Image (spheres, coloured by chain):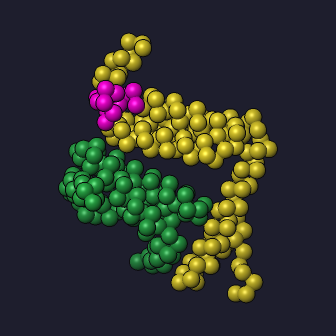
Amino acid sequence: MPDWYTRLSLGSGASFAATWSNADVVLVAFGVFVILFALGAVAASNMLAEASFLVLVAGGLLVAWPAMIALSMAAMIAAAVVSFAHRALAPKRAAEIEAEAEALAGEALRGLADAPGLRSDVAQRLRERPGGVASPPDR
Amino acid sequence: MDWAYTLLDLGAAAFRAINSAGMVIALVLLAAILAAVAGFGGGRMRLYGAMVGGMVMNAVVKAEGGGHEAAFAAMAITTALGYALGGTGLLVKLLNVRKR
């Protein structure tokens, strides 16, 4: 390992995992997250994407809170970079995923607007949102 | 049942570390809201949403000086509560709150 990393590792403090420093856990968890998330994007596999999320959770549980924040921010940046790269390399698949997400969000808003007990003005506002949550025909 | 007592003991230690009932309620409510919103994607997504809220609780307990075990127990309890409370009913109740 390079000298700067050894110093960083010693300075980051001990993690909950025996003999591992916070920096070691963050480095390993981040590496595994990036690999799984990138593979999940390439293979369009939900299972790999979920596994990458669970790796982040496990890594976060083992480290101190500043390291948790560093790991979360690094993971968000990596996810954004992988998403942009995926959009550039496979625009058709990325458009399909976006359409699926929009359909899911529209369905969720429609379900919420039609939920029993919701105030009518709030339901109306949800239906008027851009994205096309149409009023049901019987109302 | 020993594990349940241990979990509750550690949860109490986490509560003492935070030392603010309002903060605990806010974090559990956050987990429930995240679970409710993620729950539109299915039951597993609801669990993942609750877990994100639980991880926020974990970070707060650690930042307030609680140990790793207490933070883990707080995360588990918050995730369970968030999953249990986070549903469409909660969102309806929150959306029905009138602005003053």
Residue that protrudes farthest toward the top in the picture: A3
Residue A30 in the magenta stretch? The answer is no
Camera-side residue of B42 and A127:
B42
Location of residue A109 (image quadrant): bottom right
Q: Position of residue A121 (x, y in %)?
A: 57, 81
Location of residue B68 (image quadrant): top left
* In the depicted structure, whether residue A119 falls above or below residue A71: below
Q: Which residue is at 37% across, 42% downward?
A: A61
- Image hue for chain B: green
Q: Position of residue A18 (x, y in %)?
A: 31, 30
* In the depicted structure, whether residue B37 falls above or below residue A72: below
Quadrant that contains the N terminus of chain A: top left
Can residue A12 be seen at all in this image of the molecule?
A: no
Q: Which residue is at 39% across, 64% downward?
A: B81
Residue that protrudes farthest toward the bottom in the picture: A138
Q: Which residue is at 72% across, 74% downward?
A: A134
Q: Which chain did the image draw in yellow? A: A
Quadrant that contains the C terminus of chain A: bottom right
